[in-house]
Image (cartoon, helix red, strand yellow):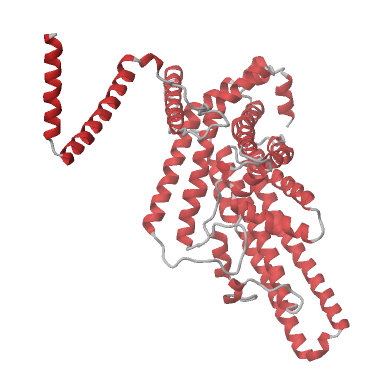
Amino acid sequence: MATLIDTAVQSRMSMQTTTDVPMPTARLRGMYQASTTEQTVNSTTKRIRDAKYRHVFATHSLERNSCLSHDAETTPSFVGFRNLMILVLIFSNLRLMIENFRKYGVLICIRCHDYRRQDVIYGLVLYILVPCHLLAAYIIELVAAQQAKSAIARMKKAGEDHDTPAKQEAARRSFNSTWRTIALLHGINATFNLIIATKIVYYDIHHPGIGTLCELHAVIVWLKTCSYAFTNRDLRHALLHPTRSEPLPELYASCPYPRNINIRNLCYFWWAPTLVYQPVYPRTKTIRWGFVFRHLLEVACLSIVIWIASAQYAAPLLRNSLDKISTLDLVSIAERVMKLSTISLFCWLCGFFALFQSFLNALAEVMKFGDREFYGDWWNVSSIRTYWTTWNKPVTNFMRRHIYSPLVGRGCPPAIAQIIVFLFSGVLHELLVGVPTHNIIGVAFLGMIVQIPLIALTDVLQKMKGVRGKVAGNMIFWVSFCLVGQPLAALLYFFAWQAKYGSVSKQFQDSPALHFFKRR
């Protein structure tokens, strides 16, 4: 009874206290208490979730795909894998360098060479005499230009009579007759250039390096001579038949035909980093000698790197492959090709950069040659066709301008014209490789012919939707050209060289492969 009374008294007192509080203050306090209570509840809930109910938290609450799946929301970056590949490549090659050094020692020898005094003499003679054929082409064109001037003088003297159909037909026959004579003279001149140089390189220059430089120089001058003749033929035709000819490029207006037939114009074309003749080229205003020195230094350094890599790493691999080729051990040959592919690719990339990026840019700077697109991004190509049109722009421009386009213009189907271009290119490749090595075995020529079906295959892949076809085409290019084609060709030509000059071990003298190459 007393407890009930005490409870009632306390309740009454609290009610009085609450009643004594003003109404606004009571409302604010209630709002504050409600907010505090809500925060307390949320905090308590979070604490319960983090502390008491960790094992029931909903980890898998969304539908998600693996980042490497083809239906992933975003494509992940592979920069880390790229860095890994670079490191693996560096460490793998360092391991091979250490292994090579422990196995063979230092094979580099500056005084060790196998060229003869005769090789140097013949090389210098060819370097001096080969450009004389370009001078002979200039003399032929000088005579043709004089005949063109005489023909124009006769037409002006005849007045309007030369516009009659009979006169035009007579002029056409005269032009064709003159062109056949000039073409015959140009053909004889260019052919003698290539035949004489090839004969001397094949029979009189033993060293393949010196022979390659001489044969390459002869082929370049031969291509320049042909371009000089073809271009001036069209310029002469445009001069004699201005109403029927297509308009000439505006660039040529500053040096019209026959003003371009002079020795200075010819000498510029001789040294210009192009195989296509034009009366006028885009020119720069100044020569940056620092630019020239830097690029020539790159050429020298890369040449030394190629020489060291060839002597220290490629030569032992090639020598160790002779017995495998002699016995036709196909599995071992495939292993040697894969082993040689690394150093072959390295030397080829260094050679490409030294020639097309460093040397040609230095030469273009000295000659103030403006158009310096000597190559494209061939390493990204997705078809073999694109590679052959981007990696060597000077040769591509010559083939397109003087072989492919004239054939198509005369009604030849484009596919047939492309095959003719590849056949012509294959012959040039065989000359540049087979003649200096004194073994015309047809490997370089067949290598070019094999490109034709690969072009058809990679063209189909390039047209596929998405990136898979393009990636496959790029891989086919790398495998066929750099990882198999080049090292296999190097093995075969090296074996042919050793078979011809008796460096193969006597125990393999009766092998069928050796007899095949000896007959060549």
Quadrant of the image occupied by residue 495: top right
Farthest residue in the top direction? 1
Above or below 299: residue 35: above
Above or below 7: residue 289: below
Front one among 307 and 53? 53
| Residue occupying image coordinates x 66% and y 26% | 499
How many marks can you see?
0
Horizontal arrangement in the rendering, residue 324 relative to residue 374 (left or right) = right
| Residue occupying image coordinates x 25% and y 26% | 40
Above or below 136: residue 206: above
Front one among 72 and 300? 72
Farthest residue in the right direction? 166
Image quarter in which the C terminus is found? top right
What is the x, y in percent for residue 112? 47, 31
Quadrant of the image occupied by residue 271: bottom right
Front one among 372 and 514? 372
What is the x, y in percent for residue 319? 57, 23
What is the x, y in percent for residue 320? 57, 20
| Residue occupying image coordinates x 65% and y 56% | 398
Farthest residue in the front direction? 1
What is the x, y in percent for residue 10? 12, 20
Image quarter in which the N terminus is found? top left
